[in-house]
Amino acid sequence: MKIFAERIKDLREEEKLSTRQLAEILGTTNSTVSRWERNICEPGVSMLTKIAKYFKVSTDFLCGLED
């Protein structure tokens, strides 16, 4: 799911957030956000929804199913 890694990093940088700040907002750890951005792991469905709501995008966008 390389597209997710790219999109979450782009969204985070557009908001001028550090990985630590995003982790705090989402209630996760800095290392988890970093692993998402490096395409090492992927968030579960509930976290994916939380990310989409925070950035005001669809889960389909995050997953690369729509532009």
Image (spheres, rainbow, N blue to C red):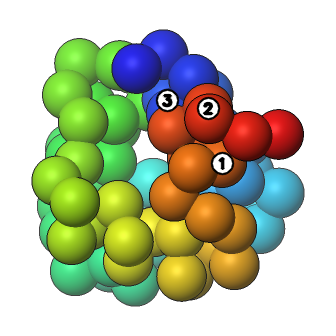
Q: Position of residue 34 (x, y in %)?
A: 34, 37
Q: Quadrant of residue 9?
A: top right
Q: Is residue 5 above or below residue 17?
A: above
Q: Secondary structure at mark 2?
A: loop
Q: Secondary structure at mark 3?
A: helix
Q: Secondary structure at mark 1?
A: helix
* Label 2 environment density (alpha carbons within 10 Å; few <14, some 14–19, many ≥20): some
Q: Position of residue 48 (x, y in %)?
A: 35, 61
Callout 3, which amino acid?
Answer: Ala
Residue topped by disc 1: 61
Disc 3 to disc 2, C-alpha distance: 10 Å
Quarter of the image containing the N terminus?
A: top left
- Give the total number of marks visible in the rendering: 3
Residue topped by disc 3: 5
* Label 1 environment density (alpha carbons within 10 Å; few <14, some 14–19, many ≥20): some
Residue topped by disc 2: 64
Q: Residue at x 53, y 69 (%)?
A: 52
Q: Position of residue 43 (x, y in %)?
A: 23, 48
Q: Residue at x 45, y 69 (%)?
A: 51
Of tags 1 and 3, the one toward the viewer is 1
Disc 1 to disc 2, C-alpha distance: 5 Å
> Of residues 27 and 58, which is closer to you in this image?
58
12 left or right of 44 in image: right
> Of residues 33 and 1, which is closer to you in this image?
1
